[in-house]
Amino acid sequence: MGKMTFFATGDSFITRRLPSTASESFRQLSGLIQSADVRFNNLETTTHVLEGYPSAFSGGTWAMSPPDVLQDIRDYGFNLLAWANNHTMDYSYGGLLATKRYLNQYGFVHAGAGEDLAEASAPRYLETPPGRVALISVTSTFHESWRAGSQRPDMHGRPGVNPLRYDTTFYVSRQELDQLKAIAENTMINAERNLSIKEGFETDNSDDSFVFGGHYFTEGSTTEKVTTPKEADMRRLERSIDEARRQADVVMVSIHSHEMEGEDKAVPPQFLKEASRKCIDGGADAVMGHGPHVLRGIEIYQNKPIFYSLGNFIFQNDTVEALPADFYDKYGLSSEANVADALDARSGNNTKGLGVNKHVWESVVAVWEMDNGQITDIKLYPIELGFDLPRYERGWPVLSKSESPLEQLQHLSKPFGTDITIQDGVGIVSLQA
């Protein structure tokens, strides 16, 4: 393997066709993308025309886009897509299978979802002149029913996403634990679970934690919440990395995660940090995070980058053309309401939500180079997505002269010991230990 250049972004929630590929802003950005050998993007929508029934649960907006938006993703220059995320199953199995079909039709190498767990968790390989690159894609944010299932000799698997589940334990004092036990006994909050265990439909937890309403509590010297990646999912992810390490020059892992530490979307949770570092320990060369729709810090771990969130690249969740009845019911709207009514209700007529959070509409794209298997430099280019535009226009990325997202990343990366300098409007990530 010789020199290889990588370009990576966060989420593309694309629901509209690109107006033109002739604009100067498009040429500048696509030129930067296409200067790299490996060009990664997370596709956060399903692509089909009502080829699946809406799930009873969605990732927030039932995401459905015309399949030809994939041509726009190609026109930007992307050649490697992840699609394990909280929208993959918005239109159930039909939407997943249709999206897979169109991704193949448009010639993308893609990973993270499939017709069973083996397919969803498998590394996918991109052939480039400098070398072969593997992509593995997982998500920690999904409805339990969206998890892909394993095939057996006597039963086929289940379509879905490659899951990265996590365990949560709340540590409380002895007094608080006793109070919870008394409340549970008086309210019978655990009655259904207790009966399920007695009848064999559910297994009891093997540790000494106490389950209260589905949450695990145990006695501790401090009061805190601890999250850890679920062992079975982590083992599967590490096996995929190990396989890819022996089959490719470079291994990249994509993790879609909305979970956060406390109530700050910009701070990654414990399990995500642990899982990301284990990916690097297992042989991954980079971890690309996305999901919260805002930037998160960058960690350089064993001289390999962990981008905890690269924010948004394309964000057009306010221009879906159709929504199921569930969405309208949620906001108390009648069958006479239309999409614009529903979006106005959700945003409080554009007074709340993602549309009024400026950090959602500015981000960065990352470019880095590897030489003989070692990363030699990482650069960050700021982009903006039209915060001040009407919702039917905003969401397209353009390279920005604003240093605001770079300064935000400087702040968010300091807890990881990562230094970012800004030179001529570009962020330079220090690789020094």
Image (cartoon, helix red, strand yellow):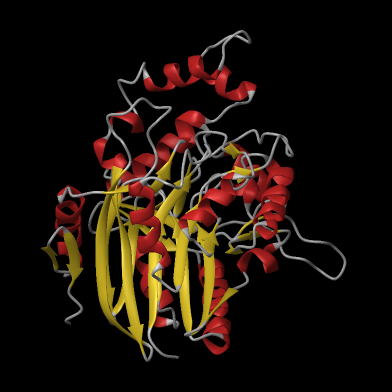
Question: Residue, x 53% and y 71% (percent of image)?
Answer: 135
Q: Is residue 252 above or below residue 423?
A: below
Residue 279: percent from the left, percent from the top?
43, 75
Relative to residue 412, is residue 30 drawn left or right?
Answer: right
With 107 as the anchor, is 410 left or right in this view? left
The location of residue 276, given as percent across then percent down, is 39, 69
Image position, residue 13 (x, y; %): 48, 43
Could you tell me which residue is drawn at 32 percent across and 64 percent down?
366
Which is more toward the observer, 73 or 187? 73
- Examine the image and state in which quarter residue 386 appears: top left
* Residue 215 locus on image (x, y percent): 45, 46
> Can residue 234 be seen by looking at this rendering?
yes
Q: What residue is at 27 percent from the left and 29 percent from the top?
A: 388
**Image quarter in which the C terminus is found:** bottom left
Which quarter of the figure has residue 325?
Answer: top right
Please name the residue shown 26% across and 72% down the image.
Answer: 378
Residue, far right:
154
Q: Compared to 289, does 369 lie above or below?
A: below
Q: The N terminus lies in which quarter of the figure?
A: bottom left
Task: Judge by depth and name the residue closer to the eye, 416 or 220.
Answer: 416
Q: Work out whether residue 338 or residue 324 is closer to the camera in this orientation and state it.
A: 338
In the rendered image, is residue 224 in sight? no
Count of numbered circles in the view: 0
Residue most toward the front?
Answer: 22
Using the image, determine if residue 261 lies above or below residue 282: above
